């Protein structure tokens, strides 16, 4: 479904659509995991009500229960639209714009909806470590300069350091880190990358000890305006891929969100990482992939704010 088709959905259509993605083989009780369920079609029952037939459970639920949609009073059609808008917007989608587009009651509602969707996009665990050629870089997002000195950037600011690892022709893994020390950076790389991989970085001294843990470590010297170098075997050394990923976050920061709180930076990283990892599919497929992740996740306003 494209955006026009999503906007034309009825509430019943949206419910059926969400159920088909969450439970492709039929309803599953979010309380006990039983698939022995019955739809409650009586006049007194709310729409979409399903009852678990497990004798030890017997609880009723809808597609919202046990997901990021739980306890939300926003219509399911607007939820599907919000998923589509965030998944199809390359640089992000602001809460104020979402409030206007969906005619939501308040900015707070739109803000919380987007954070719930980002929470669904987060990957709790990764199937396998990264391999091949992995580009690594770090940047600083948000905050203001600690000193009122012209041109003060990076480590001399209160900004949040963020690290990204991009496997060439593969996925990205991105998130905030406490600092940019050698211990922190190398520890994160070792956690996500296989030892036989080739690591490509810039000339930051904190990366020097990578040769002790990985098959190869190559770097480019940006301070000397070196952005690509070619080895004798034809291998091209550059970190342009990971830098292009950071460019998307920076454009979204400056042009869409304007401010990214340190308390929520990990969710913004999840949002951009999700879109990057699904960049080769259509907007509709990306939206469906995000909706399939809603199960087993719950984000309350007090926790998120």
Image (cartoon, helix red, strand yellow):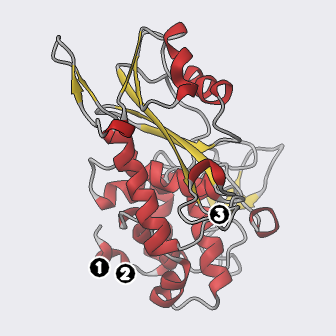
In this view, the residue farthest toward the front is 149
Badge nearest the viewer, 3 or 2: 3
**Residue under numbered circle 3:** 145
Tag count in the figure? 3
Q: Nearer the viewer, residue 97 or 103?
A: 97
Separation of marks 3 and 1 at Cα, in angstroms: 44 Å
Q: Residue at x 31, y 50 (%)?
A: 279
208 sits to left or right of 29: left
Q: Residue at x 39, y 49 (%)?
A: 245
**Residue under numbered circle 1:** 4
288 sits to left or right of 295: left
Q: How busy is the neighbourhood of tag 1: few (under 14 within 10 Å), some, or many (20 plus)?
A: few
Q: Tell me residue 277's x, y (percent).
A: 39, 44
Q: How busy is the neighbourhood of tag 2: few (under 14 within 10 Å), some, or many (20 plus)?
A: some
Is residue 164 placed above or below 108 in the rendered structure? Answer: above
Is residue 13 placed above or below 196 in the rendered structure? Answer: below
Q: How busy is the neighbourhood of tag 3: few (under 14 within 10 Å), some, or many (20 plus)?
A: some
Helix, strand or loop under label 1: helix
Q: Nearer the viewer, residue 269 or 239?
A: 239
Q: Residue at x 56, y 66 (%)?
A: 150
Q: Residue at x 62, y 75 (%)?
A: 111
Q: Are marks 3 and 2 in contact (CB under 8 Å)?
A: no
Separation of marks 2 and 1 at Cα, in angstroms: 5 Å
**Residue under numbered circle 2:** 7
Does any portion of residue 165 appear in the rendered image?
yes
Helix, strand or loop under label 3: loop
Separation of marks 3 and 2 at Cα, in angstroms: 43 Å
Q: Are marks 3 and 1 in contact (CB under 8 Å)?
A: no
Q: Are marks 2 and 1 in contact (CB under 8 Å)?
A: yes
Does any portion of residue 63 appear in the rendered image?
no
């Amino acid at each position: 479904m494209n955006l026009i088709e999503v906007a034309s959905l009825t509430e019943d259509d949206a419910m059926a659509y969400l159920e088909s993605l969450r439970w492709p083989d039929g309803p599953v009780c979010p309380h006990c995991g039983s698939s022995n369920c019955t739809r409650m079609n009586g006049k007194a029952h709310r729409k979409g009500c399903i009852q678990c037939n497990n004798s030890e459970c017997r609880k009723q639920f809808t597609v919202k229960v046990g997901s990021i949609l739980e306890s939300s009073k926003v219509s399911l059609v607007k939820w599907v639209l919000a998923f589509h808008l965030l998944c199809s917007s390359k640089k992000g989608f602001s809460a104020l714009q979402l409030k206007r587009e969906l005619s939501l009651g308040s900015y707070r509602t739109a803000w919380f909806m987007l954070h719930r969707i980002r929470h669904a996009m987060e990957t709790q665990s990764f199937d396998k470590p990264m391999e091949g050629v992995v580009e690594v870089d770090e940047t600083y997002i948000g905050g203001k300069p600690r000193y009122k000195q012209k041109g003060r950037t990076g480590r001399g600011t209160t900004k949040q350091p963020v690290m990204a690892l991009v496997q060439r022709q593969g996925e990205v893994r991105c998130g905030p880190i406490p600092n940019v020390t050698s211990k922190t950076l190398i520890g994160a790389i070792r956690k996500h990358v296989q030892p036989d991989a080739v690591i490509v970085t810039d000339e930051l001294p904190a990366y020097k000890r990578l040769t002790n843990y990985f098959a190869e470590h190559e770097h480019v010297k940006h301070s000397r305006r070196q952005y690509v170098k070619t080895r004798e075997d034809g291998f091209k050394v550059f970190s342009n891929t990971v830098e292009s990923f950071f460019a998307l976050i920076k454009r979204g920061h400056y042009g869409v969100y304007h401010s990214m709180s340190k308390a929520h930076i990990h969710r913004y990283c999840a949002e951009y990482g999700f879109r990057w990892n699904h960049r080769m599919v259509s907007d509709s497929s990306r939206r469906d992939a995000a909706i399939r992740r809603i199960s087993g996740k719950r984000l309350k306003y007090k926790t998120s704010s």
